[in-house]
Amino acid sequence: MDATRQHFLMCRPTYFAVDYAINPWMDPTAPVDTDLAVRQWERLRQVYRDLGHTVEEITPVPGLPDMVFAANGGTVIDGKAMAVQFRDPQRADEAPAYRAWFEQAGFEMYDPKHVNEGEGDILLAGDHLLAGTGFRTAHASHAQLQEVFGYPVITMQLVDPRFYHLDTALTVLDERTVAYLPEAFSRGSQAVLRRLFPDAVHATMADAEVLGLNAVSDGRHVVLPEQATGLAAKLRERGYQTIGVDLSELRKAGGGPKCCTLRLRQGKASR
Ligand code: ARG
């Protein structure tokens, strides 16, 4: 298995907090240790650097506690960047901040016509764009994604509110394979996943409940929450090298390693 050098965008959780609840993981009355969140995030960034990946950073904005979840900042494929439109007003101001970053970085910009939470719901798997809907990203945005990027878009219906973004229920391992929690999807979407990925790794609820599927793979190394021990063992059996990270503070907002990481795909060569 070959590892592909990755180019990532991340946002330091300087202003991380759980001030509101827009998913079932968030409890604004529970304490959050922002310094610990920063240390856990720095460790994730170090893991990427040690793997030879490039990490770009966007400046965090005060008053936007969820901005650390860079995956929701956009969808970037073949040098094109689609900006986002959040479902919830609490995150709305993140969209222009990320948009400005893509623009100064020289990406060809596209603006969303409907709710679209970026790579939280839109995952490139080989030559298909898997697009989640049901909680955040609107189904109507899937047609726009197909027009902009020119990849066939496959709609994935999410049915469990704990797995509200596609990247909490499914992880792309390489060009051919994914890992996912079948129960997080409608029956029809489960059938589509079986058809597209007959060799997929099926995760258990225990692994999904620690956000184990919120993982980042370079085709060979899979960075995932260290608490997801069952999934890690299954991935090693398949020949992947797993690297566990502890993002327990960020999990209080419903996020893991993938949520903190936006893939920047400059062009076809670095897809
Ligand atoms: N609190 C954030 C929200 O509910 C978490 C986002 C996690 N990001 C992700 N890509 N799943 O929007």
Image (tube, rainbow, N blue to C red):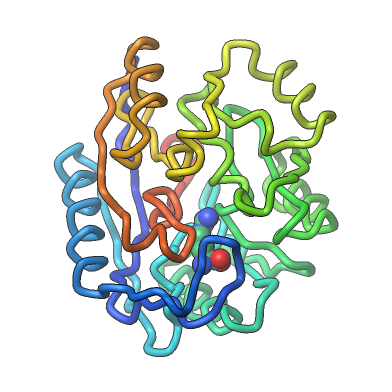
Q: Residue at x 74, y 67 (%)?
A: 115
Quadrant that contains the N terminus? top left
Q: Residue at x 30, y 67 (%)?
A: 57
Q: Give coordinates of residue 265: x percent, y percent.
A: 46, 47
Q: Is residue 232 left or right of residue 180?
A: left
Q: Is residue 73 visible?
A: no
Taking 263 as reference, is 189 above or below it? above
Q: Residue at x 73, y 36 (%)?
A: 185
Check the image and name the residue furthest to the bottom. 63
Taking 265 as reference, is 90 above or below it? below
Answer with the quarter of the image where residue 60 lies: bottom left
Q: Nearer the viewer, residue 163 or 266?
A: 163
Taking 255 as reference, is 93 above or below it? below
Q: Is residue 50 left or right of residue 211?
A: left
Answer with the quarter of the image where residue 70 lies: bottom left
Q: Give coordinates of residue 166: x percent, y percent.
A: 62, 46
> Disc count in the image?
0
Q: Residue at x 43, y 44 (%)?
A: 210
Check the image and name the residue furthest to the front. 29
